[in-house]
Amino acid sequence: KAESPALGNAATIVRDSNGLGQRAQQRFAATQAWLKDAPGKHYSIQLITVPDSEPARLESFLGRAQKLLPESEIYVYSVKIDGVQHYRVALGSYPSTQEVRNAMAELPPDLKAPNPYIRSVARMRSQNSQ
């Protein structure tokens, strides 16, 4: 199914059976592979959490993020919060909390707005559910 995004972009978003748009599908698949081998003691910057009922919001955020950051460092994984499916977007893999804090300080202003915070890779892995 296709639907126009909420931000006035004339392009359509093609969604998979889970409702994810193309950007989210690509980053979700890449994240699943990355999570299998990523060091659990590393950290990422959790940028945003979006309920699965808002796929256009997730696609829009990923579009902005991919213009500002290396795509290969953007991760999308799923979590259930109070029984409701959500998707989280995280950035990077840092070996220490100091390095992740330094990276957070350097985030573009548009990505600081949702109040990002530190998330361990081990926690991302344990919360990830498909």
Image (cartoon, rainbow, N blue to C red):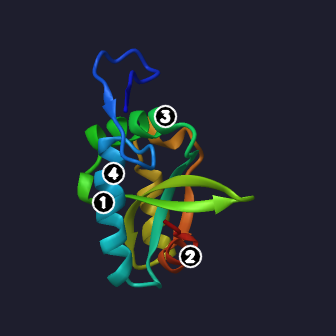
Q: Secondary structure at mark 1?
A: helix
Q: Earlier in the sequence, mark 2 or mark 3?
A: 3
Q: What residue is shown at x 55% (from left), y 46% (from top)?
A: 52
Q: Secondary structure at mark 2?
A: helix
Of the residues shown, which amino acid type is indicated by label 3? Answer: Arg
Residue at the spot of label 2 = 123
Q: What residue is shown at x 28% (from left), y 21% (from top)?
A: 11
* x, y percent for residue 80: 63, 61
User: In 3D space, how far apart are the residues under numbered discs 1 and 4 (Cα atoms)?
Assistant: 15 Å
User: In 3D space, how far apart are the residues under numbered discs 1 and 2 (Cα atoms)?
Assistant: 17 Å
Q: Residues within 10 Å of mark 4 (few under 14, many from 20)?
A: some
- Single out the mark in the foreground, 2 or 4: 4
Q: Residues within 10 Å of mark 2 (few under 14, many from 20)?
A: few
Numbered tag placed on residue 57 in the rendering = 3
Of the residues shown, which amino acid type is indicated by label 4? Answer: Gln
Of the residues shown, which amino acid type is indicated by label 2? Answer: Arg
Residue 24 shows up from this direction: yes
Residue at the spot of label 1 = 73
Looking at the image, residue 65 sits to the left or right of residue 47; the answer is: left
Residue at the spot of label 4 = 25
